Image (cartoon, rainbow, N blue to C red):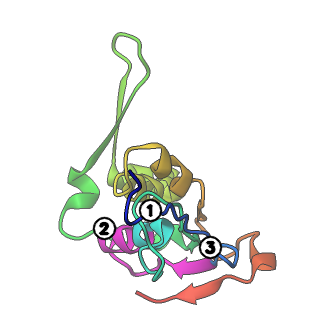
C-alpha cells in the first residue's frame, strides 16, 4: 500500500559563504557582549536558522582588554584550571585573567554560552578574539557590529 503523501527529505544549504563580523569590545559589559556574540556564531540572526544545522558566522572581537565587568566581579569572580595532579588546582580572579590573557576572558564567556555538543566546538572555532584593535582578518572584509 502506497503512502498518500511521500516523505520528503530536505536539506538546508546556505547559498553564500559565511559572513564575517567585527565587534569592538571596549566599554561593553562582558556577559551581554558574550551572549550577542554567541547568537551570531550560531547563526540565530539569520532567517535560515535551524537548530541542527551549522548556519553560523565568523566573529572577530577586538579590544578585549577594555571589556567591563559589573559590580565586584573583577575581584570576586574566579576562573579555575585543574592540571590533573594532586594540588594542581589553579585559580585566577577575573582581574588577574584580564591582565594576563584578556582574550581568554571573552573566549570563556562565549564558550560557556554555546551548546556543549559537537556543533558548539564548530561554532567556537569561528570566534577570533584579540586584545588590541588590530587583527589579521582584514582580507575577509568583516562588517562592524554594534550592540
CA neighbours of label 2 inside 10 A, class few (<14), some (14 to 19), many (20+):
some
| CA distance separating discs 2 and 3 | 30 Å
| Residue on which disc 1 sits | 6
Residue projecting furthest to the front: 1
- Residue 14's disc number: 3
Magenta stretch holds residue 29:
yes
Mark 1 or mark 3: whose residue is earlier in sequence? 1
Residue 50 at x, y = what percent?
42, 67
Please report the bounds of the magenta region as a residue range.
20-37
Image location (x, y in percent) of residue 82: 38, 25
Q: Secondary structure at mark 2?
A: helix
Vertical placement of residue 132 versus 77, above or below = below
**Position of residue 28 measured from the top left corner of the image (x, y, whole percent):** 38, 79
- Residue 8 seen anywhere in this rendered image of the structure: yes
Question: Where is the C terminus found, in terms of image quarters?
Answer: bottom left
Judged from this view, the residue extending furthest toward the right is 139
Q: Nearer the viewer, mark 2 or mark 3?
A: 3
- Residue at the top extreme? 86
Taking 69 as reference, is 16 left or right?
A: right
- Mark-to-mark CA distance, 2 and 1: 46 Å
- SS under mark 1: loop
Q: Nearer the viewer, residue 91 or 56?
A: 56
Residue assigned mark 2: 31
Which residue is more in the foreground, 40 or 119?
A: 119
Q: Which residue does the image show at 40% across and 50% down from the upper left?
A: 96
Residue 67 makes an appearance in the image: no
Amino acid at each position: 500500500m502506497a503512502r498518500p503523501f511521500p516523505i520528503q527529505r530536505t536539506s538546508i544549504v546556505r547559498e553564500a559563504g559565511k559572513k564575517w563580523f567585527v565587534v569592538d569590545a571596549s566599554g561593553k559589559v562582558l556577559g551581554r557582549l558574550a551572549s550577542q556574540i554567541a547568537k551570531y556564531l550560531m547563526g540565530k540572526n539569520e532567517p535560515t536558522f535551524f537548530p541542527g544545522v551549522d548556519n553560523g558566522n565568523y566573529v572577530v572581537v577586538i579590544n578585549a582588554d577594555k571589556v567591563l565587568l559589573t559590580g565586584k566581579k573583577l575581584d570576586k569572580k574566579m576562573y579555575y584550571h585543574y592540571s590533573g595532579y594532586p594540588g594542581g588546582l589553579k585559580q585566577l580572579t577575573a582581574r588577574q585573567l584580564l591582565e594576563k590573557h584578556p582574550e581568554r576572558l571573552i573566549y570563556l564567556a562565549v564558550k560557556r554560552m554555546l551548546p556543549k555538543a559537537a556543533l558548539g566546538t564548530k561554532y567556537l572555532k569561528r570566534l577570533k578574539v584579540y586584545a588590541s584593535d588590530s587583527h589579521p582578518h582584514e582580507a575577509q572584509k568583516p562588517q562592524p557590529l554594534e550592540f
